[in-house]
Amino acid sequence: MSTTATTFPVTNPQARARLLDTIRFDMRGLVPVVSQQHDTREVLMLAWMNREAVEETLKTGKVCYYSRSRRELWRKGATSGQVQTLVDLRLDCDGDALLALVDQTGVACHTGRRNCFFFGLREGRLVKLTRPEVAPEELYGQ
Amino acid sequence: MSTTATTFPVTNPQARARLLDTIRFDMRGLVPVVSQQHDTREVLMLAWMNREAVEETLKTGKVCYYSRSRRELWRKGATSGQVQTLVDLRLDCDGDALLALVDQTGVACHTGRRNCFFFGLREGRLVKLTRPEVAPEELYGQ
């Protein structure tokens, strides 16, 4: 019942395997991952990891997803610099979802917004609830 | 850019359709939903909705998921009383994930814990980081 955080990265391969072997990946070999800013508790985004991405995330201490559209590892922030430093990685009760507590550098969303969940219903219309904090061109070039 | 919360439930069918028609359901007709306690910002669980579950959630103001194992609507708290009252429903930038801001009555997890994300690595071992607040038998009967 210790609540002392393990230091990430997790250098011990056996420790990584203990988490990896407990995750119930879906038929595609993927697990959904919620990322949350560890101190403010802002939910940043929802993305996916395969086994290799979880392993790399634990090993490096930087969050690495699996891009379903590009079908490859997606080292978050590799192009934009908006990396997510891992603070803790939690698995849920039935082993098929992860919660990554992170320290987000800059913004999580490719639109330049801090988090990806910015559409909401207001007065019957679907509206953008926040503005970009950074121009996407600044993140990804022209 | 208004941040005034729409009152839930959403009684206008056209307003519901505006959100429903923007969601990109997956090949199974499902979308992942993160639920978060609206005031403390605790991430409670990750579950799934189909179109009917989103519609019912908006209509009733109580969160209704789709159970992939039982293949039916899962009115959260119908048996246990641990309902989630909807405060806001957000869609993400690419339309394929939802964030439900809720007011959780009691506990979200079937184990009796407040939230489902209680497994973590500590000193190389996978451990339970929290204790149940309620005995599962109290929630679901013997």
Image (cartoon, coloured by chain):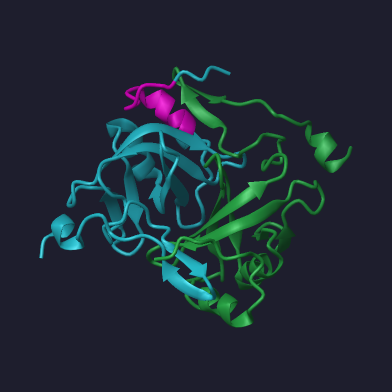
Chain colours: A cyan, B green
Residue A50 in the image, given as x and y percentages of width and height: 40, 48
Which residue occupies 47% across, 49% down? Answer: A31
Q: Which of the two residues, B137 or A104, is positioned nearer the viewer here?
A: A104
Instruction: Check the image and name the residue furthest to the right.
Output: B142
Tell me: B83 left or right of A29.
Answer: right
Q: Which of the two residues, A62 or B55, is positioned nearer the viewer here?
A: B55
Q: Is A51 inside the magenta-drawn segment?
A: no
- Quarter placement of the N terminus of chain A: top right
Q: Which of the two residues, A11 or B129, is positioned nearer the viewer here?
A: B129
Instruction: Check the image and name the residue furthest to the bottom.
Output: B14
Which residue occupies 35% across, 26% down? Answer: A10
Q: Is A13 inside the magenta-drawn segment?
A: yes
Which residue occupies 53% across, 36% down? Answer: A22
Tell me: B76 left or right of A66.
Answer: right
Tell me: A45 left or right of A80.
Answer: right
Which residue occupies 55% across, 31% down? Answer: B119
Q: Which of the two residues, B20 or B14, is positioned nearer the viewer here?
A: B14
User: Which quarter of the figure has residue B107?
Assistant: top right
- Number of marks drawn: 0
Give above or below for B138 relative to A51.
above
Residue A41 in the image, given as x and y percentages of width and height: 45, 39
Residue B138 in the image, given as x and y percentages of width and height: 84, 36
User: Which quarter of the figure has residue B39?
Assistant: top right
- Quarter placement of the C terminus of chain A: bottom left
Q: Which residues are magenta?
A: A5-19
Instruction: Check the image and name the residue furthest to the left.
Output: A142
Residue B6 in the image, given as x and y percentages of width and height: 56, 65
